[in-house]
Image (tube, helix red, strand yellow):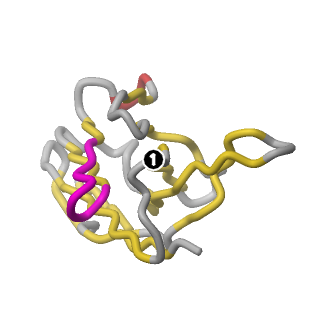
Amino acid sequence: QVQLVESGGGLVQAGGSLRLSCTASGRTLRYNNMGWFRQAPGKEREFVARISWASSTNDIEAVKGRFTISRDKAKNPMYLQMNSLNPEDPAVYYCAVEVPRPLTGLTWDYWGPGTQVTVSS
């Protein structure tokens, strides 16, 4: 089993920055892909960014050039540096781990409880 906990959320002014961290326990995640998702009020949870076990990354158009996903396999496994936050970014941000399953392939199987990000204008 894997337990994930996000931290670093909070209130920031538009244009400001936050750095989210995702701490994992239970087993090593060195060979798992990991990612960040977010869910705003009244909206479905959406994918934000992903980092592979080999540290290759991809993210959605809405955050390109502003958010950076990274990981430190020796310590806290994953971060999301968020710059130039705007009124489209407030949400609960979740970290997740992708796990290979025999029938479904790679599946986002483990989730943290989320951390709230609020942006004031």
Nearest the eye: 36 or 13: 36
55 displayed left or right of 107: left
Above-or-below relation of 28 to 36: below
In the picture provided, is 101 more to the left or to the right than 57?
right
Counting from the top left corner in percent of width and height, residue 26 is at: 47, 76
Query: Quick check: is 72 in the magenta stretch?
Result: yes
Q: Where is residue 103 in the image (x, y as percent from the top left)?
A: 86, 44
Position in image of residue 50 (x %, y %)? 44, 38
Give the tally of numbered discs: 1
Magenta stretch, main secondary structure, is loop
In the depicted view, which residue is nearer to us: 108 or 99? 99
Q: Is residue 116 magenta?
A: no
Span colored in magenta: 70-77
In this picture, is 29 found above or below 68?
below
Q: What residue type is labelled 1?
A: Tyr
In the picture provided, is 72 more to the left or to the right than 101?
left
Horizontal relation, residue 13 to residue 20: left or right: left
Q: In which quarter of the image is the N terminus?
A: bottom right
Q: Quadrant of residue 76?
A: bottom left
Q: Residue under label 1, please give it.
A: 31
